[in-house]
Image: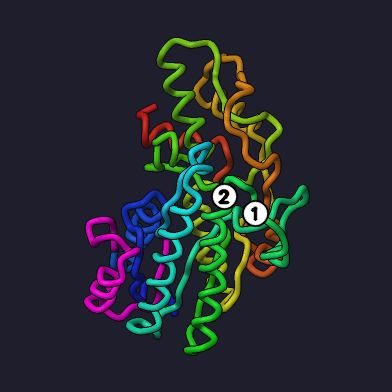
Amino acid sequence: MPLAAETTLVLGADGFLGRNVCRYFAERGWPVVPVGRSAGDLDDWCTVERIFRTAPAVGRIFHLVTRQRTGQVQYGMQGTLLAVNARIHLNLLDAWCRFQPQARFLSVGSSCAYPESEAPIPETAFQTGPLHPSVRGYGLAKQLLAVGSEAFAQEYGLTWLHCILATVYGPHDHMESDRSHFMTAMIDRAVAEKRAGKDEFTVWGAADTVRDLLYVDDQIDAVLAAERHFSNTMVNCTGNLPVTIGEAAGAIVAALDWPARVTYPPASFRGTARKTLDSTRFLEATGWRPAVDLDTGIRRVLASDYGI
């Protein structure tokens, strides 16, 4: 069914990805029912039941809600991230089954749900090894979401899709030091250090760390492309174009026209050295390719969030 002909329930509508999904849909005239923080905590069943009982019938549920932290702080709250996210995911799966069984359940995951690997990670690597220590709780909850989607769908005859995303960046991302992803944190720090008159750009991690990276509109478009071609499965949704932290830092400095020296403090947080997805299955099935290159994406963020 065309997107314009059905309504989408967007859970997490005032988060980074949710805000951009709602904006992306609104620009195209596609109807959405946004559910944000003001509706209450989705780890509480009574709140979720109320939301789903009062929502209109929809064709799609976009589950974008997660409790997440980044950097060193993750190590000290693995139990919290597991418990809160597991309750959120199970509540939403249960509500989907009870109140919106006609809807396709689209949820998003990240590469942290896969074991560490030096090679690009295909979907077949799911649950084949241990997770990185920094994301054990969060990643295990994402595994529960993917497996739970399949289990509920098999038992009740429902339709689902779990999309594993790249590291997404774009306007209106979280800026807090314990919540921002690496690209958003780098852009924000670069702007602050340039405005402070510094001639060094301080980058956490290592220059040769490898990650997938997508501008937010491209990532939304990739998920919708996956939905058109896949159902009842988990699929990696990236462009198979990984970048290094050093490449990203160089692109930021160039976009700011800032002749700064890039430095990497040895004591800064470093996750796994290489985490990149193998999205060949997705790319071959859809023919999708990203439309926004790294330089353009950075300049859009600078214009939107900093007026540069």
Out of 282 and 39, give the one closest to the viewer: 39
- Residue 296 at least partly seen: no
- Circle 1 crowding by C-alpha within 10 Å: few under 14, some 14–19, many from 20: many
Label 2 SS? helix
Out of 47 and 108, give the one closest to the viewer: 47
- Whether the magenta-drawn stretch holds residue 44 is answered as yes
On residue 131, the disc is: 1
Residue under pointer 2: 135
- Residue 24 at least partly seen: yes
- Whether the magenta-drawn stretch holds residue 306 is answered as no
In which image quadrant can residue 286 be found?
A: bottom right
The amino acid sitting under disc 2 is Val
Q: Is residue 177 above or below residue 81?
A: above
Q: Is residue 177 above or below residue 111?
A: above
- Magenta range is 35-64
- Residue at image coords 65%, 65%: 282
In which image quadrant can residue 294 be found?
A: top right
- Residue at image coords 48%, 49%: 216
Label 1 SS? loop
Out of 14 and 115, give the one closest to the viewer: 115
Q: Is residue 181 above or below residue 258?
A: below
- Residue at image coords 57%, 25%: 203
Question: Where's the N terminus, which quadrant?
Answer: bottom left
Out of 183 and 3, give the one closest to the viewer: 183
Residue 25, position as x, y percentages in the image: 37, 61
Residue 107, position as x, y percentages in the image: 48, 66
Residue 263, position as x, y percentages in the image: 61, 19
Quick check: marks 1 and 2 in contact, CB under 8 Å? yes
- Residue at image coords 23%, 73%: 50
The amino acid sitting under disc 1 is Leu
Question: Where's the C terminus, which quadrant?
Answer: top left
